[in-house]
Image (spheres, grey):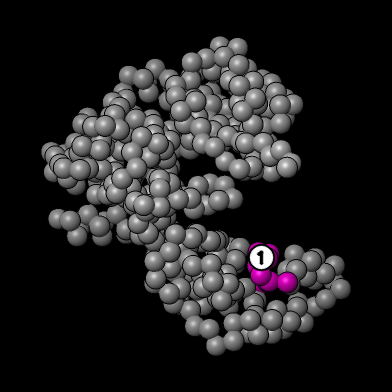
Amino acid sequence: MRYKPSYKLLTFYKFVDISDPEQITLEHAEFCNDLGLKWRVYIGTEGISSTVSWTPWQCWAYQQYLEQIEYFKGIEDIDTKSVIVDEHQFTKMIVKHRDEIVSLWKTYKAQEINDWWQRMSVEEFKEIIDSANPDYVILDMRNNYEWKLGHFKWALPAGTINFRDLEEYCDIYKKKFAGKKIITYCTWGIRCEKATVLMREFGLDSCYQLDWGVMKYVNTYDDWNRLGNLYTFDWRVSMMIGSSKHHTTIGTCNYSDKPSDNCENCRYSPCNARIIAQRKEYKKHFGFCSEECCEKARQDLLIKEESFDPMNYKWLRALIKEWQVSLSDAQAKVSQHIDHRLRKTEFNHKTNQKEDIVDQNLFHDIVSELS
């Protein structure tokens, strides 16, 4: 039988002041490419954020490399946060220099983060959820579309479409959650490191962060406290965590309103809405989130390629640009193709389902229901 290597998927970060991030980035990229790692590393003046897949021996070699660099020594829990996978999860290696390793449009010194953080252990967090302790508010610091796919029991969405929107909500938290202790969490903890500093700058002193986020909790406990799937920023998009024994689907299909853990993007490129959708319904609706996006796509032909659709829209747009096909002929061809595939399919939504339109009042609506 042919040998099949095992792989590890690892996500880690470290806030540390780096005086020469561009040079460190170049050296890091050279090493990662030589070693054969895959996916993404961000390095900036405030530290490193890395998600990579590797074989066990590559894992060992990478850790040895990190320990040789002054900035990256002693990264916490680097082993315990790895996940065993069947193959490389990504197709290439990207190492980039960015001012921020997680985008908040604010940079902090490592000392500022160390001075302000108040971590809560997964054991204490579980006890608070199990008892539904009314003294605490659990705030999901991920974006709304991530919360809709899956979250902890009792958790409220932060209200953000993008993490950099957080500052707009801090005064609202202070008013809505007066007298409460706030526990923040995210996937791995990196957002909460910066969020805690920002929130305490706004006077939210009773603010705690779940130690190393969702992944440390689910690697410690397999229970009913985690609902739904986990949104991932890679080709998996939606990932079940924990065992199927304790899995509960909370997502709702964009087309049928039935339960679904599957995530897709609207095929109309200017929209690109992240939607929860059963795969069969997504294909049935030709990948458009709404009637509006379908109609706009017929006009400008800005449609993303999909395996279930044999038409090559990129090639067709190139022919139009080169004057080999007229726009009107291409529009007619695409409209006929879409009509044939959709037949009499009806859309659940008339207008596009882009997050910054449909989710802008999510936080306020949920808090109002609880009041």
Which residue is identified by label 1?
Answer: 306
In front of the other: 38 or 80:
80
Q: Which image quarter: residue 251?
A: bottom left
**Residue 82 horizontal side relative to residue 152, left or right:** right
Residue 135: give x, y in percent of width and height: 14, 39
Q: Which image quarter: residue 334?
A: bottom right
Q: Which amino acid, by three-letter code, is at mark 1? A: Glu
Residue 105: give x, y in percent of width and height: 46, 36
Vertical placement of residue 340 versus 225, above or below: below
Give the class, few, some or many, for how many residues have Cα within 10 Å of label 1's Cα (few <14, many ≥20). few
Q: Residue furthest bottom?
A: 344
Q: Residue furthest front?
A: 1
Vertical placement of residue 157 versus 189, above or below: below
Residue positioned 46% across, 73% down in the render: 255
Q: Is residue 18 visible?
A: yes
- Count of number-bearing discs: 1
**Residue 332 horizontal side relative to residue 126, left or right:** right
Q: Can residue 103 be found in the magenta stretch?
A: no
Badge 1 marks a residue whose secondary structure is loop
Vertical placement of residue 322 versus 234, above or below: below
Residue positioned 53% across, 67% down in the render: 279
Highlighted range, magenta: 300-310
The quarter of the image holding the N terminus is top right
Residue 117: give x, y in percent of width and height: 32, 25
In front of the other: 216 or 44:
216
The quarter of the image holding the C terminus is bottom left
* Helix, strand or loop: magenta stretch: loop
Residue 128: give x, y in percent of width and height: 20, 39
**Residue 33 horizontal side relative to residue 270, left or right:** right
**Residue 315 horizontal side relative to residue 287, left or right:** right
Residue positioned 75% across, 78% down in the render: 330
